[in-house]
């Protein structure tokens, strides 16, 4: 509890941490309200008389070709995109951490095999690999989550493996061997516990990347399927009316940009705060 | 004649408010041409900061000179270094004031040959180019007594040993013929015999060039042979300064007396422990029999096995209950590898290690050298102490907690330590924690691998006292691995000397230290700095350790031993 309070205070003190956290928080609130059904208008209802209205007091971000309220749809879209981002990063972080940890721990042959597989995955551009997986599995939310999860697994494996190798050679791990500590105890208490800092930072940054990948997939029609409003889907729908109704493109675009900026700023702040070289400098 | 360097009331601070965070609080001294001043103190005493202020390198470390003056007497008149601007300082650094540091590997550029780096020093200081610079570099290497100088010019720093690298650093520094050489713990990272070589070299160079020296060290014994004046620092203040004989023979300040008396100093076997005689009838707790440890040395594209590193080659000894056996030797002698093999951290290639397995599952525990590295920084003390017990299948309950509190009190830590984390303790306290952790399972034997080497000298003394107390109280046997003869003298009952993977001499501590028989033991003991050996000058000697890499299938000739006393055996030399 004390540590959590300290962490929040440290983020609030950090300038970019403050901004990043505020952006993410606002988006989370909007997404939560959207999911609870509290939106200015029904996001799926078509107000046929109000087609392609520019932003106004009634329709804050305007309406689309079918007369649907852009702001309400954005609230739902943020929720959908965040859900996919969080779920896929969850998969990637779990799988990548396990792979990196075991590659470092077993070493030699296993290290070679596991990390070469990761290298192969890493060699593909993220969106291309995701496309490939979606092409095999067929589009949909679950496929998006798995595809993006697989795409970002190697990054976590790499982030975990290097410090895990260093930790494995530390004297406290050797000391644990002299006590006869179990492998599980050493892996969880001595290795994983010391990996929390780099993992937290990578998770935050990976959220930004996966959000972008998800938007890309949806834009190409391979992620969330219409009429479910997702940020990428909304962008795709807007492109034929770019000149007539620019707000349809501007607001989802800005949302994606701001969300990524928020995660990146937050991640940078976490990196500064958790870096042992900066720890204790202020205290 | 005015002194070469005159420092008056020097104050140096760090941080945003240097005046509030002063590390050096008003230090004054004079240094005449051709003289040597030793600055002695423990970590945090301000000795290095004082020295770094003299060439204003302290500016780059975030320090600020907040008061006082540093007058350097140059041929064209005195300069106040505290007021000099950066271009003037650049002319002074190197040309007037040279500096050598503790770690020669980090001071040399790893991607250039040492020849290129020495030539660079000559180009900057004397404007030499091309062949003239190469020739000068070769002469400089010869001056620092590096054999085959012409060939070594093409070496990269990593191809040389620590002592060689420190010589190269010295060659670079004296290239400019500085009138003042600042040496900041130049031998701390080196082995004792190499340290003696470097000290001898510095003394000879000083006699040849007539330069002055400021020698910074934590080891008051080391400077006894080289310094003219000494300044003892504590918490940023010079508590005592004066001619070396006056300070060493009649110390005035309590701290100087403490450094001279409480801290381990080598005295040639006069202060060995008198408690405990070897019970010959008892069953040894650890019996090492013809231990051989080899690591394959593979090279080339296909990692063909080209031979093996003979890290430990036929070592045998016994450890009896309640006694301390010290294994001494320099880096690469195989002493740590032997200890690790006893703990099962390294697999023996051949030979037997028998540990008395009767009462306990883990009769041997270990304390490591680095108290910062051997405690997981993310676990609190309760979790750290519980680990051996959990590993042995015990429950974390009130009884275990009781044992933790008992051991914490016993090693001199307060009970509220349980909820704290390692970074909240000092180095000495952490090592006490490691000792408590090693005692959790009530072992028979504790292996102490350089357990006090990373600690400040006065902390060292207290931890050694604690170890002796614990040994009596719990009837422990210690296997004490160390390179430091002064520490070994204080704690060992018996001493085993290792050299290049082999045991060369073993026996009663007093006998080995006072009458060493093997030529290596004699060289090792002769190299240990001591206050009693003030007048002794070391001979420059460039003996190097033989390579441990042997061709495949090589077997060393069997060892032949002779007795040199009741409990004292020496390996015969060929």
Image (cartoon, coloured by chain):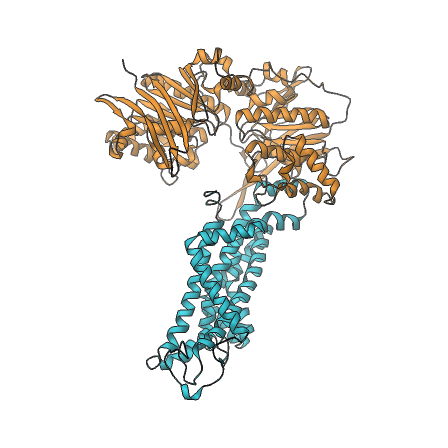
Query: Residue A225 location, x and y as percent?
Result: 50, 79
Q: Colour of chain B?
A: orange
* Quadrant in the rendering for residue B241: top left
Residue B57 visible in the current orientation = yes
- The chain letter of the cyan chain reads A
**Closest to the observer, A25 or A258:** A25
What residue appears at the point 58 percent right and 50 percent down from the top-left corner? Answer: A193
What residue appears at the point 58 percent right and 53 percent down from the top-left corner? Answer: A101
Query: Residue A65 location, x and y as percent?
Result: 41, 84
* Quadrant in the rendering for residue B291: top right
**Closest to the observer, A3 or B374:** A3
Q: Quadrant of the C terminus of chain B?
A: top right
Using residue B125 as the reference point, say whether residue B198 is left or right of it. right
Residue B146 visible in the current orientation = no
Query: Residue A13 location, x and y as percent?
Result: 45, 51
Say if B224 sits above or below B368 in the image: above
Using residue B387 as the reference point, say whether residue A273 is left or right of it. left
Q: As drawn, which residue projects farthest toward the front?
A: A57
Using residue A151 as the reference point, say whether residue B172 is left or right of it. left
Query: Residue B161 location, x and y as percent?
Result: 45, 31
Q: As drawn, which residue projects farthest toward the bottom?
A: A49
Q: Quadrant of the N terminus of chain B?
A: top left
């Amino acid at each position: 509890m004390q540590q959590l309070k300290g962490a929040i205070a440290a983020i609030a003190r950090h300038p970019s941490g403050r901004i990043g956290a505020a952006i993410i928080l606002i988006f989370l609130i909007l997404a939560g309200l959207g999911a609870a059904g509290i939106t200015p208008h029904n996001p799926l209802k078509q107000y046929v008389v109000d087609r392609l209205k520019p932003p106004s007091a009634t329709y804050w971000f305007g309406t689309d070709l079918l007369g649907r309220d852009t702001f309400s749809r954005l609230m739902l879209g943020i929720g959908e995109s965040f859900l996919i981002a969080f779920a896929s990063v969850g998969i990637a972080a779990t799988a990548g951490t396990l792979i990196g940890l075991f590659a470092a721990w077993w070493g030699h042959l296993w290290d070679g095999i596991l990390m070469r597989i990761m290298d192969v995955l890493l060699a593909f551009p993220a969106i291309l690999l995701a496309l490939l997986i979606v092409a095999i599995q067929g589009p949909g939310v679950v496929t998006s989550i798995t595809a993006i999860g697989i795409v970002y697994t190697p990054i976590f494996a790499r982030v975990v493996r290097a410090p895990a190798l260093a930790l494995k050679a530390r004297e406290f791990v050797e000391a644990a061997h002299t006590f006869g500590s179990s492998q599980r105890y050493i892996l969880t208490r001595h290795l994983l516990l010391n990996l929390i800092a780099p993992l937290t930072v990578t998770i935050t940054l990976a959220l930004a990347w996966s959000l972008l990948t998800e938007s890309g997939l949806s834009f190409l029609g391979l992620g969330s399927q219409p009429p479910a409003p997702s940020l990428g889907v909304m962008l795709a729908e807007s492109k034929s009316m770019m000149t007539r109704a620019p707000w349809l493109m501007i607001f989802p675009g800005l949302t994606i940009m701001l969300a990524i900026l928020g995660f990146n700023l937050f991640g940078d702040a976490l990196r500064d705060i958790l870096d042992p070289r900066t720890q204790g400098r202020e205290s | 004649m005015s002194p070469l360097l005159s420092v008056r009331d020097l104050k140096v601070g760090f941080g945003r408010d240097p005046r509030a965070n002063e590390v050096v609080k008003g230090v004054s001294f004079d240094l005449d041409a051709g003289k040597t001043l030793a600055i002695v103190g423990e970590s945090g005493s301000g000795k290095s900061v004082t020295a770094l202020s003299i060439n204003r390198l302290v500016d780059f470390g975030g320090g600020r000179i907040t008061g006082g003056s540093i007058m350097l007497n140059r041929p064209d008149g005195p300069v106040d270094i505290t007021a000099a601007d950066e271009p003037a300082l650049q002319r002074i650094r190197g040309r007037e004031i040279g500096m050598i540091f503790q770690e020669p590997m980090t001071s040399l550029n790893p991607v250039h040959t040492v020849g290129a780096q020495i030539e660079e020093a000559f180009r900057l200081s004397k404007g030499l180019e091309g062949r003239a610079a190469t020739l000068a570099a070769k002469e400089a290497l010869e001056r620092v007594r590096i054999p085959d100088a012409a060939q070594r010019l093409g070496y990269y720093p990593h191809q040389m040993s620590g002592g060689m690298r420190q010589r190269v650093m010295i060659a670079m520094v004296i290239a400019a013929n500085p009138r003042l050489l600042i040496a900041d713990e130049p031998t701390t990272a080196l082995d004792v015999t190499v340290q003696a070589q470097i000290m001898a070299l510095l003394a000879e160079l000083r006699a040849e060039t007539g330069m002055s020296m400021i020698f910074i060290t934590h080891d008051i014994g080391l400077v006894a042979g080289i310094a003219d004046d000494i300044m003892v620092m504590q918490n940023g203040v010079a508590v005592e300064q004066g001619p070396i004989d006056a300070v060493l023979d009649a110390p005035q300040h309590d701290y100087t007396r403490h450094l001279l008396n409480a801290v381990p100093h080598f005295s040639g076997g006069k202060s060995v422990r008198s408690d405990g005689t070897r019970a010959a009838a008892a069953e040894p707790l650890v019996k090492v029999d013809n231990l051989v440890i080899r690591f394959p040395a593979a090279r080339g594209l296909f990692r063909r096995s080209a031979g093996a590193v003979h890290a430990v080659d036929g070592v045998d000894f016994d450890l009896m209950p309640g006694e301390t056996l010290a294994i001494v030797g320099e880096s690469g002698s195989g002493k740590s590898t032997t200890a690790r093999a006893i703990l099962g951290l390294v697999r023996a290639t051949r030979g037997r290690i028998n540990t008395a397995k009767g009462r306990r599952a883990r009769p041997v525990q270990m304390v490591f050298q680095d108290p910062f590295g051997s405690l997981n920084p993310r676990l609190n003390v309760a979790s750290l102490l519980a680990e051996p017990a959990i590993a042995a299948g015990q429950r974390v309950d009130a009884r275990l907690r009781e044992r933790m509190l008992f051991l914490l009190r016993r090693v001199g830590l307060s009970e509220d330590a349980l909820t704290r984390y390692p970074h909240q303790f000092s180095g000495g306290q952490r090592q006490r924690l490691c000792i408590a952790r090693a005692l959790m399972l009530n072992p028979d034997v504790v292996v102490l691998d350089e357990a006090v080497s990373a600690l400040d000298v006065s902390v060292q003394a207290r931890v050694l006292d604690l170890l002796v107390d614990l040994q009596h109280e719990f009837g422990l046997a210690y296997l004490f691995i160390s390179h430091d003869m002064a520490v070994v003298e204080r704690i060992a009952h018996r001493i085993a000397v290792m050299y290049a993977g082999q045991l060369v001499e073993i026996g009663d501590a007093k006998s080995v230290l006072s009458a060493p028989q093997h030529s290596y033991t004699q060289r090792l003991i002769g190299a240990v700095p001591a206050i009693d050996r003030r007048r002794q000058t070391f001979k420059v000697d460039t003996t190097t350790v033989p390579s441990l890499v042997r061709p495949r299938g090589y077997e060393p000739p069997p060892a032949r031993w002779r007795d040199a006393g009741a409990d004292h055996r020496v390996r015969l030399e060929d």
